[in-house]
Amino acid sequence: GAGVSQSPSNKVTEKGKDVELRCDPISGHTALYWYRQSLGQGLEFLIYFQGNSAPDKSGLPSDRFSAERTGGSVSTLTIQRTQQEDSAVYLCASSSPGLGNTGELFFGEGSRLTVL
Amino acid sequence: DQQVKQNSPSLSVQEGRISILNCDYTNSMFDYFLWYKKYPAEGPTFLISISSIKDKNEDGRFTVFLNKSAKHLSLHIVPSQPGDSAVYFCAASGTSYDKVIFGPGTSLSVIP
C-alpha cells in the first residue's frame, strides 16, 4: 500500500526477551520517526532519522533501545531485555520535509507491545 | 521538560457547538505547529497546520489560531460533530527538517 506499514501489529513477549519492530515508510519520504504511546499517555518522541544525517536519538529512554534505518527506507526498532514498563504502542511516522513544507507526518497504525 | 503542553486532558461539547482545544509551548524556536487527530487503535492523522508567519489558518470546520507572543495556539472546531470525538494532539517543530514534538493530547467527546 501507499501508507506507512508497521509490523507486527501486536507482540506479546516475556520480560527479558528482545523484540524487533519494523517500519516501512512511504516511498520517497526522507524523514522517519519512532514514537511510543503508553496507556493513557501522549506521544513520546524516541528517535528521528532525516536523510543521511546522524539520527536524533535524544528520546530513547535507555540503552536497551536502538533503531536502524537501512538504505534510507525500512527502519527497525530493537528493544533488548524488555521490561514491563516497555509495554506501549510504538508508532512510526514518515514525512517529506522541505522548504515551505510543514513536513506533515504520516503515521502507521502502530505495533502494540505487551511485556508480561 | 514538556515543551508542548495541553493542559486539558479531556473536553466535552454538545453537537453543533464550538470545540476549543488549547496548546501552549515553551520553546521559542518552534516555527511550525500542527494538529493531529487520533481514534483508538489507529495512528494519528494530520488535521491542520500553521507556520509562525501567520496567526490564523482555516480549513473547513477547523481553524487554528497562533499567538506567538503568548506561545499559545488553539484549534477551533465549528460546528462540532459526534465523529469529531477523538484525541487531539498539538505538535511543534523548529523547521520542517526538525523533529516534531507532540503534546500529551486532549480527548474530545462530542455529545449528540
Image: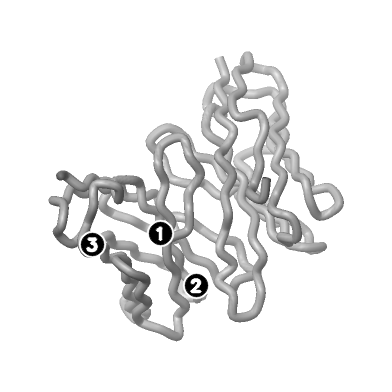
- Report whether B2 appears left or right of A30: left
The residue under the point 67% across, 17% down is A16
Residue B1 lies, in percent from the top left, at 45, 55
Whether A71 is drawn above or below A103: the answer is: above
Q: Same chain for labels 1 and 3? Say yes or no.
A: yes
Structural distance between the alpha carbons of marks 1 and 3: 12 Å
Residue A45 lies, in percent from the top left, at 56, 50
Residue A101 lies, in percent from the top left, at 59, 75
The N terminus of chain A: image quadrant? top right
> As shown in the figure, which amino acid type bears the numbered disc 2?
Tyr
Q: How is the image coloured?
A: one colour
The residue under the point 50% across, 76% down is B31
Location of mark 1 (residue): B90
Marker disc for residue A15 = none
The residue under the point 45% across, 69% down is B49
Location of mark 2 (residue): B32
